[in-house]
Image (cartoon, helix red, strand yellow):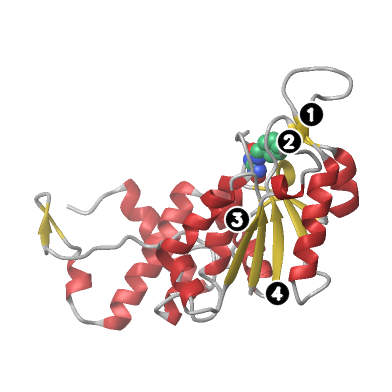
Amino acid sequence: MRIDVVSLFPEWIGQLEQFGVVGRGLRASTLELASWNPRDCADNANRRVDDRPYGGGPGMVMQAEPLARTIERVRAARADTHAPVIMLSPQGERFDQRWAERLAAGPGFVLVCGRYEGVDQRFVDRHVDIALSVGDVVLSGGELPAMMIVDAVARLVDGVLGDARSAQQDSFVEGRLDHPHYTRPAQALGEDVPTVLMSGDHARIERWRLKQALGSTWLYRPDLLAELDLSADQSRLLAEFVAEQTAPPK
Ligand code: 4GY
């Protein structure tokens, strides 16, 4: 998997290589990450790649041509000719776990991080295949969303996560939230660990976790729950959880 990131702050993107699962994936060379600064494709000695907006208004706009030349360099550096160019923008389609899975299944992609008031539309029209948004929030640049996408995709790439099972067991993979987690010590902040987790009975533990996962999805994400096709057994576990919520056992 190869990911190219076009950004005015390539050193920031480069930080990803030093930490966590992305760093490990890169060192294990299952993942390749390259960043590109459009300033290196500026046509002036000042390395300027922005200018004032036509029609007036505040702020600056990223110019089309330095970005287009950067994309050409990226294309020349990639073995695949059709890697999608993805722009991070609040106008984009919402990035979620399904998108992460879709991107992780391919050979890679190119992320374009806008800055200032925006990017000249002629670049977008010519070179951008998809716009993705990480949420209804306006950031000062596409870098944080790009890093979020790199992280979410990288941990799905084979060999990046230490434990192959952990990506499969994540929340959202099954379309629901995760169950609660506990670790040592057995008593912390004056509270015990739920006894079932100390029982060594793996089948019971799995059922408890499933029940908690369905329960928190019911509590916090009823929209996700509505999309789930619960089995009779899962419906029974959830009904138990709901009953315990309204009348806590003494
Ligand atoms: N939200 N999701 C987002 C964003 C910043 C001006 C275009 C978001 O993805 N990107 O807020 N991006 C803007 C800044 C140029 C990108």
Identified by mark 4, the residue type is Gly
- Residue 125's place in the image compared with 210, above or below, is above
Residue identifier under label 2: 48
Q: Residues within 10 Å of mark 2 (few under 14, many from 20)?
A: some
- Residue 168's place in the image compared with 66, above or below, is below
Q: Residue at x 67, y 67 (%)?
A: 103
Q: CA distance from mark 4 to mark 3?
A: 30 Å
Q: Which circle's residue, 4 or 2, is located before the other in the chain?
A: 2
Q: Is residue 233 visible?
A: no
Identified by mark 3, the residue type is Ala
Identified by mark 2, the residue type is Arg
Residue identifier under label 1: 51
Q: Which circle's residue, 2 or 3, is located before the other in the chain?
A: 2
Identified by mark 1, the residue type is Asp
Residue identifier under label 3: 226
Q: Nearer the viewer, mark 1 or mark 3?
A: 1
Mark 1 and mark 2 in contact? Answer it, CB < 8 Å.
yes
Q: CA distance from mark 1 to mark 2?
A: 8 Å
Q: Which circle's residue, 1 or 3, is located before the other in the chain?
A: 1
Q: Residue at x 48, y 58 (%)?
A: 16
Q: Is residue 200 visible?
A: yes
